[in-house]
Image: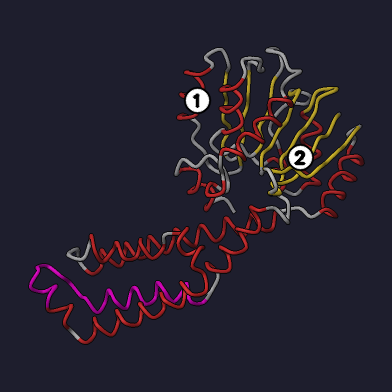
Amino acid sequence: MTAHWNNYWAQGNTSSFADEVDNEFQEQVDRIWLEAVAELSPQHQLLDIATGNGTIPLQLMKHTSKLPSTIVGCDLAKIDGQFAQQQAAQIAPEIRLIFDSEVNCETLPYEDQRFQLVCSQFGVEYSQLALSLKQIHRVLSANGTAQFICHHQDSFILKQNRHTLALLESQAFAELFQRGHQLNQAYGDISSRVKLRRALSSDDVKSANQNISALCDRLIEDHQDELSSTGALEQIQDVFSRYIQEPLSSRASRLNDVEQVYKLHTERLKDLRSAALSATQMANLEDLATQIGFITTSSEPIYCGQRLLGWHVKLSK
């Protein structure tokens, strides 16, 4: 499961759905986390599960100095916290920010009752909750709390996700790369402007261009907004505009790289779709938390203006 997330976080993204993040969203989640840490002291410790590139710790440091002296961020993906740690050192040098890579929240490696707060922003719901909630309960101190922001099946994030997946999982989108390779073969090796002019006037290139143009028109008709937001057409076009004089095999490799980006993107969005929680699933989460030993549980939908953002979950030990 982690290869596509390794790739995603390595690109420097700060959210698991970066395209949908805006100021209104950030202000809402900042309020939630600032309230969550309001009662903590420097002697306490905070654990951020599925931390990615450390968005929660960094945002907290920007808005308040009243934080635990140690914040630990862990993630199942392979993450490099060096850049976030450098930012943290500039914002709040008195806070020790630790990143633990390739840590499964279903088997947390931390000692019992270490943390006074465990948080997760669009992360814990990707796990097997029967296992991860037990681990969270174990590492929480007496009277500690766990707070999560989780994906909601009916949120604006999931609605956009479904539209994008409809494009990425369509047969026409797969054909787009097939026809790109056919066009690449038709061009052959282009080592000079003379060869390029000859190729452009050849029947093979004209036919391949017509085929890919017809497919693009169909995709635009069916998925215009999603296609525009992905930038896939521009990336394929870029191979033939910027790199046309590279060897045929080099252009083919570039096309493969672009296709791989969208395969990884598809897997990430499928994960998100599977992780999102319905009202019934949220009720089951609260029941499970009670069975595990949490004293109080609560959940409520949260909004950005009129847009449904997700679930806010609070569990107290």
Quarter holding residue 243: bottom left
What kind of element bears circle 1?
helix
Which residue does the numbered mark 2 point to in the structure image?
Answer: 312
The residue drawn where x is 51% and y is 18% is 91
Taking the image as shown, residue 78 lies to the left or right of residue 34, namely left
Eyeballing the image, is 108 above or below 19?
above
| Residue range corresponding to the magenta coloring | 171-197
What kind of element bears circle 2?
strand
Total label count? 2
Coloration of the structure image: secondary structure
Q: CA distance from mark 2 to mark 1?
A: 27 Å
Q: Residue 217's x, y, as percent?
A: 42, 76
Pointer 2 or 1: first along the chain: 1
Amino acid carrying label 1: it is Gln
The residue drawn where x is 62% and y is 33% is 27
Amino acid carrying label 2: it is His
Eyeballing the image, is 219 above or below 70?
below
Q: Residue 119's x, y, as percent?
A: 71, 33
Question: Which quadrant does the N terminus fall into?
Answer: bottom right
Which residue does the numbered mark 1 point to in the structure image?
Answer: 85
